[in-house]
Image: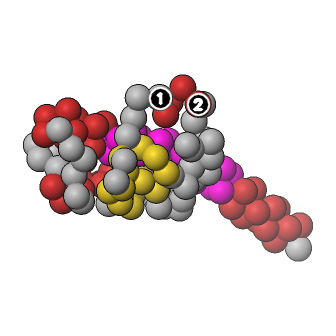
Amino acid sequence: MKLKNVGMALLVALAVCACGVQKQADAKFGDQHFKTVVSLVELYKLRTGSYPASLADLTFTGDWDQIAIASVQYRKLDDGYELDLVRGWVGRPDLSYPPAFWNGLGLRKSNLKHAP
């Protein structure tokens, strides 16, 4: 009986730890994916003079960039673009950036906290 209780306690502890690891991984991957796509979109604008109609229009992307592109939803707006983060590692992280992060970007709307 005592061994069963210890085993149950270990399972609960592992589940709690795994949740923390997943949240941290979601935040790290989500942050990287979001910033990667912002960089790709802004580079496209710098090269062509306008924002892409869709992320499929991005050129010179690497294999790892495709993972980031699949983690966001993009929509071109009249005065810039909207970019929503839909996935980090497994789930959608709850990210926020300081006001200075948004300066100088054409990013007008996002589902992240403190977005313009």
Task: Point out the image quarter for the N terminus.
Answer: bottom right
Q: Which of 11 and 31 is in front in this view?
A: 31
Q: In percent of the image, x 49 and y 51: which residue is there? A: 109
Residue tagged 1: 103
Q: Quadrant of residue 92?
A: bottom right
* Colour option used: secondary structure
Residue tagged 2: 99
Whether residue 71 sits left or right of residue 93 in the image: it is: left
* Outermost front residue: 78
* Outermost top residue: 100
Q: Mark 1 packing: few (<14 Cα in 10 Å), some, or many (20+)?
A: few
- From this viewpoint, is residue 86 visible? yes
Q: How far apart are marks 2 and 1 (CA)?
A: 7 Å
Q: Which amino acid does label 2 sit on?
A: Pro
Total numbered badges shown on the rendered structure: 2
* Outermost right residue: 2
- From this viewpoint, is residue 33 visible? no
Range of the magenta residues? Answer: 17-38
Whether residue 105 sits left or right of residue 12 in the image: it is: left
Whether residue 21 sits left or right of residue 64 in the image: it is: right
Q: In this view, does 49 lie above or below 80?
A: above
